[in-house]
Image (cartoon, rainbow, N blue to C red):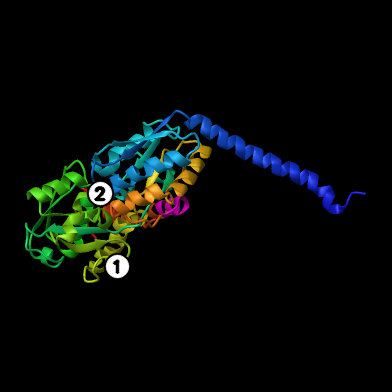
Amino acid sequence: MISGAAKFSAPLLALTIGVSAAHGAGADSVADFYRGKTITMYVGTGAGAGAISFYPMALAPAMKKYLPGHPDFIISYMPGGGGIKAANYIYGIAPQDGTAWGFITRGFLLAPLLKVPQAQFDPTRFNWIGSPSRTVSIGMVWNASTDVRSIFDAMRQQVVVGATSMAQDTGIFPSALNRIAGTRFKIVPGYSGLGAVDLAIERGEVQGKVGSTWKSLNSGPTARWVRDNKVTVLVQLGVKKAADIPATVPLGLDLAKTPGDRQLLEVLCAPSATGYPSFMGPDVAADRIAALRAAYEQSLKDPEFLAAIRKQDLDLDPIGAEELTDTVRHIYALPNAAVERARRLLPGEGAGGD
């Protein structure tokens, strides 16, 4: 006689085997595709641009271990428009097969929302992989080039700051602070990447920058700037203050004089919640995205990866793919009135009323 439990065991076993077989087939399919392939990690700035270029370098050897098929990984630098060029490429030009992986400073996320003409991509359609760390943007000056030591000094005295583009963080943030807080930042755009801005600061071409991240400032070639007291941080540009920046450095949001001004700054600061986001094109197959996300999560725990980021003084405070996707959707659901005011900060859009 067959018991009740035994009656259900055979179908259940068959279902379990079927699911396992399908999963195994999916894994085999991903491995077959990636075997012998090369994944290009496109960094949307020049080489040596702080954390945004060092994280992919640390990830590449770890990802090769954990992604089925063990493809090679190479890094390609694609500066231009503060990341817009690279984002356009991954969205509409690069192969949509899982071999093009974007690493771009989070400021590019606002470009389509603010209707920047060059931005031909929809961030809500990207397949987000993850971000290795949360961060906050800052404004800083080179102490040898100016006697400005606070954001309030910058309201009384002109500060020349370098920027990659007027439509990206290093152009938008100082423009917003000039409008809302009365600072006197003179913006010099056109640098190929943040590394180029940093060289201009050291050469005395400009006196600082507004809109790069605190973590980038403390990694790579610029890490010594903070240690040697060569720079002063004037303002924090995020949704909340960073614990490792002196509490006396104000949050940009707190400089707003009206609720409307604060909401405008909230629009501009929202991408800081994505840290150092990475993504693939909108049409990459779901099984490859799932495999990449899984390998990425494993890579963040890999001893070789951890040793590499410690060597560069980088932090690890990961944002997963699901949270990153939700954050991007939140950004694109921000109030239209605040977005429109932010858009009017861009070149050619006019001053507009409040």
In the displayed structure, 267 sits above or below 281; it is: below
Q: Is residue 193 left or right of residue 316?
A: left
Q: Nearer the viewer, residue 153 or 214?
A: 214
Magenta span main SS: helix
Q: Is residue 299 above or below residue 243?
A: above
Give the number of marks. Answer: 2
Where is residue 280? Give x, y as percent: 41, 40
Q: Is residue 167 above or below residue 239?
A: above
Q: Residue 50 — which label?
A: 2
Q: Quadrant of residue 209?
A: bottom left
Label 2 environment density (alpha carbons within 10 Å; few <14, some 14–19, many ≥20): many
Q: Residue furthest bottom?
A: 248
* Residue drawn 37% across the image and 41% down it: 60
Q: Nearer the viewer, residue 187 or 301?
A: 301
Instruction: Tell me the amino acid under the disc marked 1.
Output: Pro
Assign a secondary structure to mark 1: helix
Q: Which residues are magenta?
A: 319-328
Q: Residue at x 44, y 50 (%)?
A: 325
